[in-house]
Amino acid sequence: MAVIEGWTKLLEKTNPVPGAAHRRLLGGGASNKNDFPEWVSPTQRKLLQATPSNIKPDIVVAQDGSGQFKTVNEAIKSIGPNYKTPFVIYIKAGVYNEQVIVPNALSGIMFIGDGPTKTKITGNKNYKEGYHTQDTPTVAIMAPGFMAKDMGFENTAGPEGFQAVAFLSQSDYSVYYNCQFDGYQDTLCPLAYRQFYRDCVISGTIDFIFGVARTVIQGGTLVVRKPMDNQQNVVTAEGRQDPNGVSAIVIMNSHITNQFPTYLGRPWKNFSRTVIMHTVIDDIITPAGWVPWDARWGLDTLYYAEFENTGPGSNTQGRVTWPGIKHITPQEAEQFTPVKFYAEGDSWIKDANVPYTAGMS
């Protein structure tokens, strides 16, 4: 089962990071800080602030039989053609071992759990066992308008499994609040469109945040895990392929932590773009900061910037001096805040009513 029809057209370059398996690549006004971007409707905001005890879900999933279904897949398959959005699936505490796909036809779906360490969807499909990267996601969201709150998503293959995606999303106008994404190589793939992650934990080793979306991670905790002995960790691998492309990985007001050395990122494609700002970075960053994908691949055309970060790992002395490394001004940094970065507006996030910083502070 290929979760994204045609995405293998984008899988064209091998992966030379030491210890990583040979792989083909995947292909793409300020508000107060308690608001979401403008694309989130008032109803969605209320849901993102709600708890299971004060909402009436459309479907309840529970392994103990107290809901309509015992698996998430059964719940999704039950949704008829005339459902109303947002459509809320409450997934009670438990570990759900299944591969879940929300197809493109099911827009406006929301998963709400009992907490990111209590409600987990888990899997372990991985490259080493013969799966293509696009077939490994534990959860894949194809439809627009998806939201998740208080959920955990994981791929337990371990570093020895090489590429093993926990969560993949090509959901436009999607919001993730207080969720946890655990894996090793290729944990989280925001593949395309506009995606906003707030107060989420993301863990992994190599390229554990990668994709070609307009991705903002705000208030996140990025946990660098222990790789195999012959591997080197890399937090991001952004895949912008065109100088006029709108994608980037923006990490702001977050924390990059743990005890294992890592690079901040590497260029998956020639015009890779990543900005890390106002983030606490622990003493785990290799002084060079950024690492090539393959020789001179993208080093002249990428866009990598660090802006007003703190912590011992934020010291930029010793960083690589590629032409694509940027030293940006406050005005330039502001272009990567949600209110500016989402050029069509941030009402979709405001409407979600989750904690949200639209601008620089």
Image (cartoon, rainbow, N blue to C red):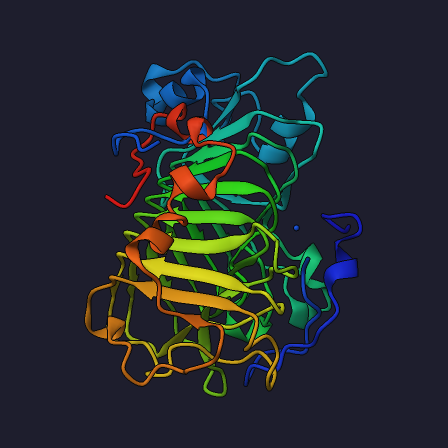
In percent of width and height, residue 234 lies at 46, 72
In percent of width and height, residue 141 lies at 61, 40
Depth order, front residue of 304/222:
304
Up-down: is 127 above or below 355?
below
Depth order, front residue of 165/76:
165
Count how many numbered circles sit on residues in the image: 0
Up-down: is 61 above or below 5?
above
Residue at the extreme left of the image, as rendered: 311
Depth order, front residue of 192/227:
192
Q: Can residue 51 be seen in this view?
A: yes
Q: Which residue shows up at 48% across the image and 48% down it?
A: 215
Q: Is residue 91 visible?
A: no
Q: Which residue shows up at 57% across the image and 50% down it?
A: 246
Q: Which residue shows up at 43% across the image and 32% down it?
A: 346
In percent of width and height, residue 349 lies at 42, 31
Q: Which residue shows up at 68% across the image and 73% down it?
A: 23
Up-down: is 74 above or below 22?
above
Up-down: is 351 above or below 329?
above
In percent of width and height, residue 45 lies at 39, 22
Looking at the figure, which quarter contains the C terminus?
Answer: top left
